[in-house]
Image (tube, coloured by chain):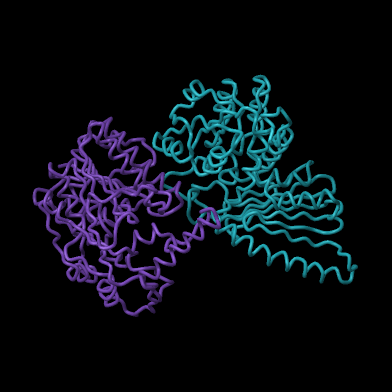
Amino acid sequence: MDTDTQKPKLKAAVIGTGLISKEHLSFLSTSERADLVGVCDISQAAANYAVKRFGAETAYTDYHQMLEQAQPDVVHILTPPQIHKKMSMDCLSAGAHVICEKPITPTYDEFKELWDFAKKCDRHLIENQNYRFNQPILALQKLVEDGTLGTIGEVEVRMALDIRSGGRYADQNLPSPVHKLPGGVIHDFITHLCYLALLFIPTFDYVKAGWNNHGGGNLFKYDDLDALIFSGHQHTRIRFSAYTQPDCFSVTVRGSLGYAEVDLFQPYIRCVVPRAVGKQLSPLANQFANGWTFMNASFTNFRRKLLQKTPYEGLHSLLEQTYQALQEDKPLPISFEDMDKTSRLVNALIAEENHL
Amino acid sequence: MKLFITGASGFLGQYIVTEALRRGHQVKAVLRPQTDETKFSWFNHPNVEIVRIDLRQSSGLVESLQSVDAVIHLAASKSGDFYTQFAGTVISTENVLIAMQKAGISKLIAISTFSVYDYVKMRSHQILDEDSPIEADPLNRDEYAQTKLIQEQLYRDFERDGGQVAIIRPGMIYGRDYLWNACLGAEIGDSAWLRIGGNAIMPLTYVENCAEAIVIAADKEAAFGQTLNIIDDNLPAQNVYAQKLIETMDKVPKIYFINWFFMGLIANMAWLFNRVFLEGKARLPGILVPAKLQARFKPLRYSNQKAKKILNWQPTYSLDQAFERSSSTEYLLAVSVPKSS
């Protein structure tokens, strides 16, 4: 018998019912570790829909009322970043652990303040760093840990998203609140880029960053970022582009023995390393091996598309591990150090605006 | 009357504003902040006041509803993911209804759709009318149907709370630049069609006919408290409409036909496979999902008797006239300025 499921379920609540809420709510509605006691949104219709669709107990339009009446053990905060700190503090004060969407706060100082407050309340604070738990990233980590790639020297994290030609970020009628973040729209993605880079080169000495608005206009503050991060002899490149296509979210790790590359939107792993056939034949062996891997990825990704698997697969894994850790009072999958260094790196990149 | 018309810049909305002005009403036309107003013939008409609001947020809505007699609420999203359509259709409607309550406006002409009906529950060749069943399992339908069903529930709630509501469900609206119809099949690029079925009657309403019925409803006490289907008389079968459409085209597309019965069989098999082997998790193309397929192609009969009786309305233009007008160079949105102005 699974002893985990014998532990009392944690009462979970959600604030905010935008796009990402579907992922959190679908986890909570099926988890053996959580009871979804409330969903809150300023729109009654949106809260009602989420309650009905995901089997929550009650819909709220005032999160203070939800905290008081539902008394959740865990609150998921899925609102625009500018109000994360205030809402998180209110939830922590009410005795709830907080799982917060990225970026946890717009600035590093606010993160520190929030972290200290969580400590004071003796509650946990977790930023959603979901892509760390995607299978291709876990596979990449394994290659690094077992020494297949040798000593790591370079990392490149690249995201290309066509956000200028349509969709919620290009909406001029009701601009997304993320346009007002210090890094503009890119600030909404940069947390992901930074924590993935830091997985493989965990420290940094200094950064150089070029922030640009190639498309011009007043809506977008920036639509392009090219940043270099230096840590001793190790280099990291973080790249966000709204103009190169197709959309991708790739991570490449280069070491003294070889390199590996993954993509999270169309998952695959390409690994170029010394093979058992010797130096002369290794290039050929790598091409055969990677050809086979690509062919399998095409079938796997067709199946993923058919079954509506999204790049958010890691979020369910992160939430499962988080709820398990909370139930069993064990270390959380996202630590203070993980959030601290990510927030510091984001801050450093924004402070280095156009110093590249 | 002073009418507050949301979605005024849309295909149907432009014709409704025009029809309302022709009938001597004053109009507050709601446009989103970035919409270019000068492209509408009525933008500087003395009886039109342009209201700049994005209905996904409520700021300024109550104030703009002052002195309004009735609201014709058309605004909705037809594209994007579920959450985009939810914001554009459901949250917009919620904001309008809350603002109406605050402003003390009770009369609402609420534009719904034929998409809310439950086509799986209906037998082939059955008459679809206002009493036909509403979709019971929205998750089997597309995002548009899902959000319009939630929107209709908001209308019912508004009515329960004291609002006077006329729910108008137009059939498939067609007109100039919008002659292709999803009930025919699917367009494959610019030069080919996939035609599904051929003899099913199409629940069509020509845009000028539909606009006329909606504006009449705003001024007709008997319409409030009613749900009315708006479709034209003498509805054509798919083959007839397709032939008329082809006659308007310079180049005839290559057409691939699929028999309706055969297509239904394929969709049912795909549905069964999905249920049995994929736990129902696969997202298949719409024509392979029975509920979506039947909503577009199931052979049914349709009635507009209730709307004609309550509104004392007769569709002005026949199919032939509608195609002639749609294909002509006549400016269909012309509105004369009152002499007193």
Between A31 and A149, the one lying in front of the other is A31
Res A261 → quadrant = bottom right
Residue A4 horizontal side relative to residue A220, left or right:
right
Residue A32 % position (x, y): 60, 36
**Residue A275 percent location from the top left of the image:** 86, 64
* Picture layout, residue A147 above or below residue A5: below
Q: Which residue is drawn at 33% across and 52% down?
A: B118
Q: Is residue B327 left or right of residue A343?
A: left
Question: Furthest residue to the front?
Answer: A1
- The answer to whether A77 appears left or right of B200 in the picture is right
Q: Which residue is more in the foreground, A298 or A177?
A: A298
Q: Locate the N terminus of chain B by quadrant.
A: top left
Q: Residue at x 17, y 41 (%)?
A: B224
Q: Which residue is drawn at 54% across and 36% down?
A: A78
Which chain is purple in the picture?
A: B
**Residue nearer the viewer, B261 or A88:** B261
Labels in figure, total: 0
* Residue B15: quadrant of the picture: bottom left
Residue A61 position within the rendered picture, expressed as x and y whole percent measured from the top left = 43, 29
Q: Colour of chain A?
A: cyan
Left or right: A183 with respect to B156?
A: right
* x and y, in percent, of residue B251 in the image: 34, 80
Q: Which of A157 and B110 is in front in this view?
A: B110
Rendered view: A67 above or below B295: above
